[in-house]
Image (spheres, rainbow, N blue to C red):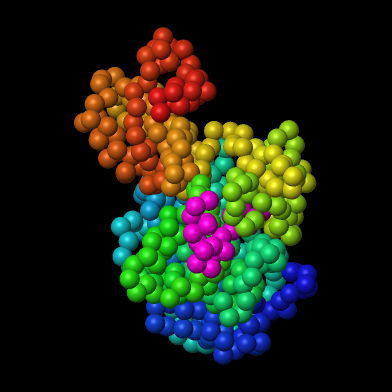
Amino acid sequence: MAEVTSYFATWPWQHWATKRPSAAALSFGEQTFSWAEVSARVDEYAQGLIEQGVKRDQLIAVVAPNSVQVLWLILAAIRVGARYVGLNPRSSQPELDQQLESLQCDFIWYPAKIEHAFEHYARVSLLPPQQPRLVPVTWQPTRPATLTLTSGSTGQPKAVVHSAQSQLASAAGLLEWMDYGEQDSWLLSLPLFHISGLAIVWRWLYRGAGLVIAEPAQFETALAAVTHASLVPTQLQRLLVSQDRSDPPPLALKQVLLGGAVIPVSLTKQAEAVGINCWCGYGLTEMGSTVTAKRADASSGVGSVLPNRELTLKDGEILVRGKTQCIGYYRNKTIFPVADAEWFATKDLGRWSGEELHILGRVDNMFISGGENIQPEMVEKELLAYPGVKQAFVLPVDDSEFGQRPVAIVEVETLLDKSLKQALHEYMQERVTTFRRPVEYLEMPDNLGAGGIKVSRKCLTEWLETRE
């Protein structure tokens, strides 16, 4: 296989527009775009961005759920040499304001119907130009292209910068193991403000196959019609249940990349029985998504290291490097290296069993719920701002659907009754994103919270386990 750095001599969509101009590339609802049409549309929108004053290396923030407009904007931004960063539209207004202030973005795009207010930022539109114009940016795969927010050990989101080259390397490595041909189609089933969603786009661009975007109401129908999808187990379970109905729709799905939760063996066996190959793995934003992978089986491991990546263990901590590694972290309009050393320390703990990696947990306090990183200190800070809350600790509890969910253990001035729990729940709805909100509020045990002694997270964890 050719090196990723020389795989494309021009923009990937232009490459495929030359090689396979009439082949179906992108589908959205009833609309289907060929590669020639995708290339022409991206160029039009890129010209429109230039007409609105967007320049190279400027940052465009997008606050929106997946849509064909977001995809066009990402490709057009890259085409003009600008940079895309996606923000979770389900985040609270304070969270978004903090992220935008930290990023110092030059432009922002969001749908017409959105409950957040961004009047202090220059809004860009997704429009063709009033007058045709030249886009004076050539294909340079090593240029910074996308930023993706990920939580660090401090709880403050870090903006991870990837080039087209690193993301194509990620796609190339996975697709050496997983079949994804020119006639196949991958459903854009994960958000584009996550590296996992962006990884789908780059696999599509690398292979020159099909990409499908579906409205939420049409998700199940679209899932049955595509050949590839990235899902959490509950989504796959719903699809399989639908096949038990009378006269179910024909199932085209043949490859599923699972993540975000514990994967039941019974589920993967059921999927395999109807012709769906299930894959699982381990990945991180700094490495362009998936690092290890395997066909899902009874083992709790996450597979072996994919091509274009390297992985080693040092004192039990997972260290990674390779062609898929990001350029660095973005702050103060500058890109800084992710690590001082050659290897990037993930703060994940692991062990080898033969050639398969097993994940043991985190070096720090962070845990993962449904594929989302949760830093307890971030949630605790918001809880402590509520009147009457003296101490707050957020810990994970096992969950069959999400892997783990956050639970809050609090010490309050009054009684933690049903009314106060409801008040805390409503308060946190305004303060933090859905996946970070505690699913339960528990009163601090007297023997752990009294006497002014510093509370041990380890002791709280042990108490929580005995309570369960």
Residue 302 image offset from top left, x and y in percent: 63, 49
- Is residue 339 visible in the rendered image? The answer is no
Q: Which residue occupies the foreground of this view, 294 or 131?
A: 294
Where residue 60 sits: x, y (%)?
A: 51, 63
Q: Is residue 177 left or right of residue 254?
A: right
Identify the residue shown where x is 56% and y is 60%: 278
Q: In front: 403, or 242? A: 242
Range of magenta residues? 265-293
Left or right position of 46 against 451: right
Outermost residue, top side: 451
Residue in view at x 56 percent, y 66 percent: 255
**Where does the image place residue 122, in percent across and percent down from the top left?**
43, 63
Rendered residue at 34%/74% (across/down): 247
Q: Magenta includes 278?
A: yes
In the rendered image, which quarter contains the N terminus?
bottom right
Is 140 magenta? The answer is: no
Would you say 202 lies left or right of 389 here?
Answer: right
